[in-house]
Image (cartoon, helix red, strand yellow):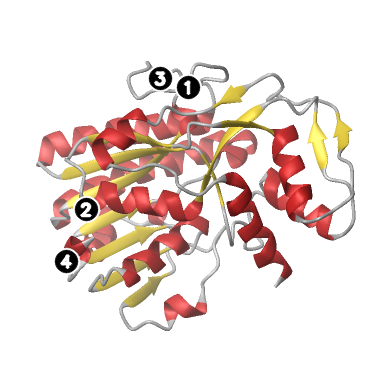
Amino acid sequence: MQSILGKTCLVTGGAGFIGTHLVRALLVHSAKKIYVLDNLKYGKLSTDITADSRVTFLQKDFASESAESLRSILTGVDYLFHLAAEKHNQSVDDPMLVYHVNILGTSRLFEAAASAGVRRIIFTSSLYAYGAMKPPAMHEADTPEPWTPYGISKLAGEHLLAACSKAHGMEYAVLRLFFVYGIGQFPGMGYKSVIVKNFERIRQNVAPVITGDGKQSLDFVYVEDIVDGILRAGFLAPSGTLVNLSSGIPTSILSLTEIMLNVAESPLKPEFVAPDWTSGSSRAGSTTEAKRILGWEATTDLETGLRKVYQSLCN
């Protein structure tokens, strides 16, 4: 990642789960300056990051800033990593907020970045842009058919970025993230994943919960692998890149829970509750394009990643 050296970056959502890991990686790779923009609605500042003189924290809601304010903030920035968003679970309760932030706010941000002369934008989209709930593995060539407000908003963000690039000649890359997990996933606010919830229960000697029969499967990717993919898209990939960051491996909730219990050396047995909307689903991504374009693949196996998470919770 030699090309990060001496560059100025801005990370929206930089105090969030993935954003925090990304900022640390940018520091390791010798970024000259990093602006962390976050409203702290779901994020939490890490002292090791704020203590670095290269980091400037801006407690702002990007979707509430004026075009002029955003342009001022982005002036002098080489790379914009746009991670901030209202998430899928928030969209269930307030879809209009999701559209306001993820579509209108994102559009204003992209236009301000172009006006400020930002060289490249890296946008983290989502598997929810596909809308698929069953095999085969989701491929970038598939026709997206999102049916959730979050998925719709993420696909809209992809199109807005492509249109902005076409209009202004700015470089960009889009990454469709699958189910990201890792250390620091839940800083105390926002949505708790099944991994966080059930590790908390296991640590309290309470049975982990499985909805339905547990055969629904997800594509889990460790956060450090995700950050590596984001950096490759930011500094190595051709403009216009659109790839999945996925493991390509669908893991059932039954299997996930079994691994978690083994990692924790727990004799507990899972508790089964009524099925939810994920019943019978299988969501995994094709890895072909990420390997071809970025030379990237997930290298952290699930047991190793879960062991790291569990050890961090016990420390």
Disc nearer the start of the sequence (3/1): 1
Q: Amino acid at mark 1?
A: Ala
How many labels were placed on the picture? 4
Q: Quadrant of the N terminus?
A: bottom left
The residue positioned 49% from the left and 30% from the top of the image is 128
Quarter-wise, where is residue 213 in the image? top right
Please tell me which of labels 4 and 1 falls first in the chain. Answer: 4
- Measured in 3D between alpha carbons, the distance from the residue under mark 4 to the one under mark 1, in whole angstroms, is 40 Å
Instruction: Tell me the residue that label 2 is attached to.
Output: 235
Do the residues bearing badges 3 and 2 touch, measured as CB atoms within 8 Å?
no
Given contact means CB atoms under 8 Å apart, are the residues at marks 2 and 1 in contact? no
Q: Dot 4 corresponds to which residue?
A: 76
Residue 292 lies left or right of residue 203; in this view the side is: left
Q: Mark 3, mark 1: which one is toward the viewer? A: 1
Q: Is residue 225 visible?
A: yes
Q: Residue at x 44, y 44 (%)?
A: 298
Q: Residues within 10 Å of mark 2 (few under 14, many from 20)?
A: some
Q: Secondary structure at mark 2?
A: helix
Mark with earlier residue (3, 2) = 3
Q: Which residue is mark 1?
A: 137
* Along the viewing direction, whichever of 24 and 171 lies nearer the viewer: 24
Say whether residue 84 is visible: no
In the rendered image, residue 253, in percent from the top left (x then y), is placed at 71, 34
Tell me which label, 4 or 3, sits earlier in the chain: 4
Residue 151 image point, x, y percent = 48, 30
Cβ atoms under marks 3 and 1 closer than 8 Å? no
Q: Which residue is mark 3?
A: 144
